[in-house]
Image: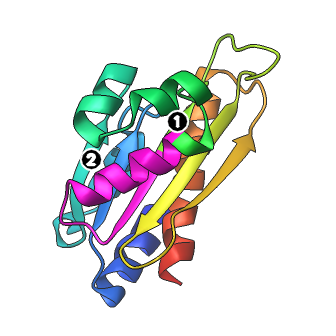
Amino acid sequence: MSAAERLLAAARGAGAQIATAESCTGGMVAAAITDIPGASDIFDAGFITYSNAAKEAMLGVHATTLAAQGAVSEPVAREMAEGALARSRATLAVAITGIAGPGGSAFKPEGRVCFALAARGRPTLSETQDFGPLGRAGVRAAATERALALLLQALA
């Protein structure tokens, strides 16, 4: 059973509705969930906010946070997750923002991805993973798997 299939079963059992807010994964988390038959039972919305302007307009990420922290940061990931939760019927939202590559910098290298998990009635959690220079497809796949794992952990 795939992570997305386990997530669907866990969310059904918990009566949870899920939303995603994705930047570097470009909708891959939402696609992994909605590839499973019956996903409409638990999936409410997916926001693909690749640009900073989209993060602001669609999710309510503050321009000041983006300017001070940069798009690849835990504060931005938290605002993305909280924005997805506020703008959907979801009870649980995950956000992903990172540098899939190629490229990056000494401060924000290729493979750095920030995640956040927002749930109604709970504090928002965030973390940063450094997947390393796996190549664009590798970083995006690793980030997708981590986001699914975070959602599963929240439902456990």
The answer to whether one can see residue 2 in this image is no
Q: Residue furthest right?
A: 106
Give residue 110's position: percent from left, percent from top.
71, 22
In depth, the one of 43 and 86 nearer the eye is 86
Location of mark 2 (residue): 46
Amino acid type, callout 1: Thr
Q: Circle 1 sits in a helix, a strand or a loop, which is it?
A: strand
Q: Are marks 1 and 2 in contact (CB under 8 Å)?
A: no
Q: How many marks?
A: 2
Residue range in magenta is: 76-95
Q: Position of residue 84 (x, y in %)?
A: 30, 52
Q: Residues within 10 Å of mark 2 (few under 14, many from 20)?
A: many
Position of residue 112 relative to residue 31, above or below, is above
The picture places residue 149, in percent across and down from the top left corner, at 57, 63
Q: Is residue 133 left or right of residue 84?
A: right
In terms of image quadrants, where is residue 130? Answer: top right
For label 1, the crowd category at 10 Å Cα-Cα, with few meaning under 14, some 14 to 19 and many 20 or more, is: many
Task: Label 2: state its secondary structure.
Answer: strand
Amino acid type, label 2? Gly
Q: Quick one: label 1 or label 2, which is nearer the N terminus?
A: 2
Pointer 1 residue: 97
Q: Is residue 52 magenta?
A: no
